[in-house]
């Protein structure tokens, strides 16, 4: 019996020890089971710390980038401010450029500078190709074309075939400021000018009348007629049209002969001005093609042809064979090329090449300026190159550059 009782005690101890061992092993297993989630939490926390740190670094980089961009913009703005104001115009019309610059130097705006600069050329009768002194039509009368454009609002005023008023660009500005129209022409444009207070007077001079008489004695050569009878190459007219059925298809495809254009035989001042506040304006004034058919209006008063400006890009102005250039709106084309990223010079070259592709014998030039104050010019078939005048802040004196032209 004692042996049996001792055996039961041993069995009970063994059971107790086994149970205790299982409990201990279970606790260690539970600890092992629970450990990974705790470690995972620490990893997540560590990841979140890194994420926060990364966000802070990204934010810091963005701030530095924005600061650098702001500094670049400030430098660009300062550079632009140092490049403005600027005046550029066609030909060696230095007094016109100086007059426009003087307006800016005394606090005037771009529109005032353009009007006064072109008016000065009308008064001086620059190269006898602007103003009332020359370029009589077939009847011996001088008529004027002009326009002015505000790049801030795209407002335009223009006059064509204006009679008996010397200050054509000033009349154009009245059209812009006192009417809802863009272009007035002929005798009724003269009536408008009279209502605006302009003096009516003859535009003929002894010199213009002599030009007209010499032209008639030379059998009215050159002239602008074609497909008429009698032959305009040897006769003055009056002319009658040749029936359409008699016009050779070969002659319609052949490029027309064009009048000779050079520094002393053209008809336009074109000017672009950007003032110190970045406001841009353009203008033109012209007495038209010499010996033109009465009633003819050239490119000078046509928006996008004579000149064009845009407050987001810059501006351009043209001179030369206006009947051809008006067909391509080269000033507009130049500005749009600058909008695409071209420099003023490259943009002007592009516009010139577009015209020359269709009319290799045409003659003309373009000046251009962007809002950064960079200038450029291009030309075609001007035998001695194309001179243009400009003024920039680094030197308030008028400079003249001559750009060499492409040719037929």
Image (spheres, grey):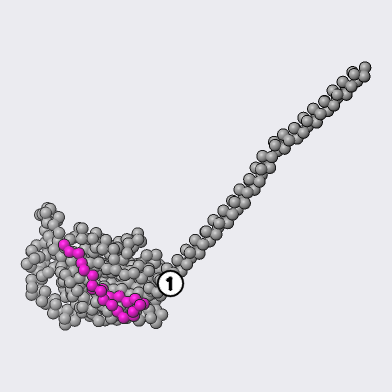
Q: Is residue 394 above or below residue 256?
A: below
- What residue is shown at x 53% (from left), y 61% (from top)? 63
Residue 286, how many percent across, how many down? 25, 73
For this orientation, the residue located farthest to the right is 1
Locate the C terminus and report the quarter of the image it occupies.
bottom left
Residue 3, how many percent across, how many down? 90, 18
Decide whether residue 76 is among the magenta residues: no
Total numbered labels placed on residues in the image: 1
The part of the image, by quadrant, that contains residue 277 is: bottom left
Label 1 CA crowd tier, 10 Å (few <14, some 14–19, many 20+): few
Locate the N terminus and report the quarter of the image it occupies.
top right
- Horizontally, is 394 left or right of 299 in the view? right
Residue nearer the viewer, 192 or 63: 63
For mark 1, what is the residue? 78
For this orientation, the residue located farthest to the left is 234
Residue nearer the viewer, 137 or 156: 156
Residue 404 in sight from this viewpoint? yes
Decide whether residue 406 is among the magenta residues: yes
Residue 350, how many percent across, how many down? 27, 61
Secondary structure of residue under mark 1: helix
Residue nearer the viewer, 208 or 186: 208
Magenta-highlighted residues: 387-408
The part of the image, by quadrant, that contains residue 226 is: bottom left
- Horizontally, is 242 left or right of 374 in the view? left
- What residue is shown at x 40% (from left), y 71% (from top)? 80
Q: Magenta segment, principal secondary structure?
A: strand
Residue 389, how many percent across, how many down? 27, 75
């Amino acid at each position: 019996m004692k042996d049996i009782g001792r055996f039961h005690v041993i069995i009970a101890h063994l059971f107790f020890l086994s149970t205790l061992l299982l409990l201990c092993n279970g606790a260690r297993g539970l600890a092992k089971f629970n450990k990974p989630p705790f470690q995972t939490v620490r990893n997540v926390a560590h990841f979140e710390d890194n994420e926060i740190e990364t966000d802070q670094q990204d934010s810091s980089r963005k701030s530095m980038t924005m600061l650098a961009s702001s500094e670049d913009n400030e430098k660009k703005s300062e550079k632009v401010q140092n490049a403005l104001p600027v005046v550029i115009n066609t030909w060696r019309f230095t007094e016109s450029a100086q007059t426009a610059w003087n307006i800016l130097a005394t606090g005037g705006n771009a529109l005032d500078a353009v009007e006064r600069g072109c008016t000065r050329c009308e008064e001086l009768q620059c190269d006898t190709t602007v103003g009332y002194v020359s370029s009589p039509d077939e009847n011996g009368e001088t008529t004027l074309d002009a326009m002015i454009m505000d790049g801030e609002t795209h407002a335009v005023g223009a006059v064509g075939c204006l009679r008996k008023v010397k200050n054509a660009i000033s009349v154009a500005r009245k059209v812009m400021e006192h009417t809802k129209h863009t272009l007035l022409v002929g005798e009724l444009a003269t009536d408008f000018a009279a209502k605006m207070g302009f003096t009516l007077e003859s535009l003929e001079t002894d010199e213009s009348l002599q030009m007209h008489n010499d032209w008639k004695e030379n059998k009215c050569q050159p002239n602008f007629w074609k497909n008429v009878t009698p032959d305009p190459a040897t006769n003055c007219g009056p002319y009658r049209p040749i029936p359409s059925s008699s016009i050779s298809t070969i002659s319609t495809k052949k490029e027309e002969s064009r009048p000779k254009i050079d520094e002393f035989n053209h008809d336009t001042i074109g000017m672009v001005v950007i003032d110190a506040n970045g406001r841009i304006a353009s203008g033109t004034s012209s007495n038209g093609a010499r010996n033109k058919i009465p009633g003819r209006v050239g490119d000078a008063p046509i928006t996008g042809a004579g000149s064009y400006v845009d407050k987001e890009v810059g501006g351009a102005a043209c001179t030369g064979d206006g009947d051809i250039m008006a067909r391509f709106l080269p000033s507009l084309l130049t500005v749009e090329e600058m909008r695409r990223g071209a420099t003023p010079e490259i943009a002007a070259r592009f516009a010139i090449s577009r015209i020359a592709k269709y009319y290799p014998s045409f003659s003309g030039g373009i000046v251009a300026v962007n809002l950064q104050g960079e200038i450029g010019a291009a030309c075609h078939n001007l035998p001695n190159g194309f001179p243009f005048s400009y003024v920039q802040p680094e030197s308030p004196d008028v400079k003249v550059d001559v750009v060499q032209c492409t040719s037929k």
